[in-house]
Amino acid sequence: MATTTSPAHGASPLSGSRHFVNRADHGDEIARVITFIFAASVVLITLLLVLSLWQGSALARHKFGFSFFVTQVWDPNAGIFGALPFIYGTLVTAVVSLLIAVPLGIGAAIFLAELAPARVSDTLEFFIDLLAAVPSVIYGVLGIFLIVPLMRSYIEPALKKTLGFIPLFQGPAYGIGFLTAGIVLAVMIIPYIISVSREVLLSVPRDQREAALSLGATRWESTWKVVVPFARTGIMGSIFLALARALGETMAVTMVIGNTPQISASLFASGYSIAAAIANEFNEASSPLHSQALIELGLVLFLLTFILNGIARLLIIATSQRGSGTANA
């Protein structure tokens, strides 16, 4: 009678170990482990950063609790710390910058991706990348010597004369404040919006354009009614990336916002941002409570930008998958 033999239970681990040794001999397994360590270190650094900020702000968190986020007083001498003026200044300058940068950035991206000749598009994209690489302190210097005088002498008086009945454009025009900081931020984030939006628009399948053109649509109609709606998720991602960049900006805003911890309805008024407060006060913190209050501000800013960057990345990936057809695979 023929008998069948089954592999011993101990053969599988032995063969697996031999397989590992063979792969290690060729360097595959070693390379995989090393590169995995490199990739995991990024996550580890992020977690350590959050943990460090969390532990470093323990005293402020325990003393102020949630009131830290709604208190308007920031008085190191009295030991009273409220983050609301800094949160307000950060959000106002970011919103102003987006209101200016989004139309300009998306319009420029549409031109470069859909309407400009390839040579012109590539040349302008090179200069846009250069603008994105300029250090923020250079934009701050530009703001002090160019934008602030223009705001003080021409733009803010004109806005006050024509729109002075709106609380946003009331008060003395000193040239520094929320509006000036928002304009400087807009100049900084426009290259990010243009670059990312252009890549997203270029990822839209060509047959989408050709289908619209074959139905009698003009080039602009094809772009505005077909290409842009198809890429809107990725364009929103570029806006979120720009917003995260604006929220975390330090030097340029510090140089033109006025650095006054107050909440004002007027865009002409001086203000303060989270990043500017940390940069200005951390080295001169007069007490452990003062230092830990600044660290808690950093934790708030870190989590906010982390969430916004994550949302932006998901939106861009979603649009890229739609463009490549992998979303329906």
Image: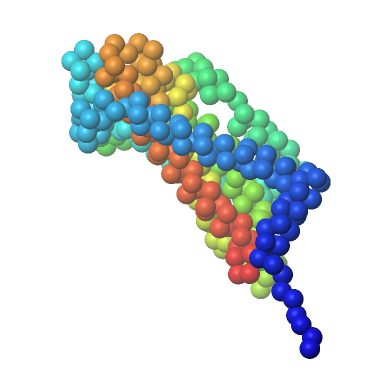
Residue 161 visible in image: no
Q: Residue furthest left?
A: 78
205 left or right of 105 in image:
right
Q: Residue at x 72, y 46 (%)?
A: 29
- Picture quarter containing residue 180? top left
Q: Residue at x 41, y 29 (%)?
A: 52
- Between 185 and 78, the one lying in front of the other is 78
Residue 303 visible in image: yes
Q: What count of labels does the image hold?
A: 0
160 left or right of 208 in image:
left
Q: Residue at x 20, y 27 (%)?
A: 63
Find residue 69 and report its horizontal and vertical position in percent.
Answer: 25, 34
Q: Residue furthest front?
A: 1
- Picture quarter containing residue 32? top right
262 left or right of 308 in image:
left
- Between 157 and 213, the one lying in front of the other is 213
Q: Dividing the image into 4 quarters, which one contains the N terminus?
A: bottom right
Find residue 269 and report its horizontal and vertical position in percent.
Answer: 30, 25
- Between 109 and 313, the one lying in front of the other is 313
Find residue 169 and report its horizontal and vertical position in percent.
Answer: 30, 32
Q: Residue furthest bottom?
A: 1
Query: Height in image: 272 above or below 203?
Result: above
Find residue 284 and report its horizontal and vertical position in percent.
Answer: 35, 11
Query: Height in image: 129 above or below 117?
Result: above
Q: Dividing the image into 4 quarters, which one contains the C terminus?
A: bottom right
Q: Residue at x 67, y 61 (%)?
A: 10
Query: Height in image: 257 above or below 303?
Result: above
Give the colour scheme shown. rainbow
